[in-house]
Amino acid sequence: MKRIANFYGVFLNLMGACFALPLLIALIHGESSSVRAFSLVMLLCFVVSFVIRKICRSSIGSLEIRPRETFLLVATIWLIASAIGALPYMLTGAAPNFFDAFFETASGFTTTGATILNSVEELPRAVLMWRSLTQWLGGMGIIVLFVALLPSFGIKARNIAAAETPGPTVTKLSTTFSGTAQRLYIAYLLLTVAMVILLMAGNVSLYDAVNHAFTTMATGGFSTYNDSIAHFNSNYVTWIVTIFMFLAGTNFELFFILFFDSFKKVLKNEEFRLYASIVVIATALITLSLMNQGGYEDLFRAVTDSAFQVLTIMSTTGYATVDFALWPSFCLMIIVILMVIGGSSSSTAGGIKVVRLLVVFKIIKREISLKLNARTIDDIMLDRKKLLPETLSFIIGFISMYTFTLLAGTLLVSIADPAGMITNFTAVLSCISNVGPGLDSVGPTCTFSFYSNFSKFILTIVMIGGRLELYTLFIIFTSYYWKPGKA
């Protein structure tokens, strides 16, 4: 427990440092209540961190975290981060109670983008910056950032980061995982900076450009305006955001392949080809539906709205330029399917991930072959590499757990809030896939504020579980985990 407690102490130092940016914004704009709130929370983090590390008296380099402890560590770090991050909302009066503040912060760190705030434009600029920053910090992973900044931390970083990183596998891009984490964050940071520059070229202010770059690259979707990207009323801004949502939903490892190897190798990646194909096909189908049934007469407008909404849902960003809840039912079915699929592995997107869908297709194909010829034994290959049976089992297990959590979560939310099956089902689906908007009463122009505190808590746990790929959070609630002597 001392090893874990010391990790918490060091983490709280990092957490406290993260409040510096919103504090700076508060000082620049003279927001006295925000200055007090962020200063107090920053001080609290530093003091608690100092006390913990003083009691533990263990240096960073001497820490060794056992494999089974990583699950408890990662899950509790995300819960602690969400609880601490909720304090500025409460101290500034942005959120009326802890459940609302906890929901909003967890929605930020998990890059879900669901909100209980009915008018974000009334909030202090510092609070909005913190809101966007939580998504950027959570996009690539809070602990992955921790490992990137502290490469000398004496732990098996790969085990911990793998419990947090989206996707079935974590590929080493360096001889050490801290080196891999650093490279991932370099790509993440460079893309964020590039987006800020391109948005400012479209007459977007520096403040808005930074906020929206944070939440786009994190595929989070928080905006500084009530009407989201529609506020800018600019095709240029819409397409810049669309392009960067596509990039954010792409496996970040491919950026290094592109830079150090070749574009041809990127195009050969099976997951990327399926990801791009789904985006193109879904955009084409929705465009045709909007032109035939949706009342659209301008083809460019139909393509623009279709591409934006396909990518904002598939990348699980959750922005809006139109109220797609009013689109034809065919379009809505495609959107729901995209909410389930999500983006690529090792991206900042949520959902079950394209690579898992690809593997399931390959398993189905193999099972059909076995029905036709029982003596045929085909290995499941991905990018010319054989997938081990335990990897296939893990993927099938994840999809089963995803389905169970989706149904159980909908049932629990429906007990306290009979808001309608479509509302509750898509609310839970949105949270487990970290999308943001759902349908009906939780559509792109609505908020989650009407839900009871019980339902908000359930949805918050579902959001964190979805962000941590379910296993990491839910394994600590099993009796097997707490049995002494188990590995």
Image (spheres, rainbow, N blue to C red):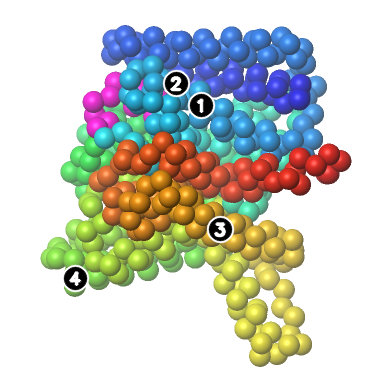
Q: Residue at x 23, y 26 (%)?
A: 122
Q: Is residue 153 left or right of residue 449?
A: right
Determine which quarter of the picture holds residue 400.
bottom right
Which image quarter is the C terminus in? top right
Residue pointed to by mark 1: 83
* Outermost residue to the bottom: 372
Cα separation, mark 4 vs mark 3, equals 35 Å
Q: Please give the label number shown on residue 293.
A: 4
Q: Please give the label number shown on residue 404.
A: 3
Determine which quarter of the picture holds residue 215.
top left
N-terminal of the pair, mark 4 or mark 3, is: 4
**In this rendering, the label closer to the viewer, 4 or 2:** 2
Cα separation, mark 1 vs mark 2, equals 7 Å
State the SS at label 2.
helix
Q: Is residue 322 left or right of residue 277?
A: left
N-terminal of the pair, mark 4 or mark 2, is: 2
Residue 148's place in the image compared with 438, above or below, is above
Observer-nearest of 472 and 416: 416
* Outermost residue to the front: 415
Residue pointed to by mark 2: 87
Q: Residue at x 65, y 18 (%)?
A: 9
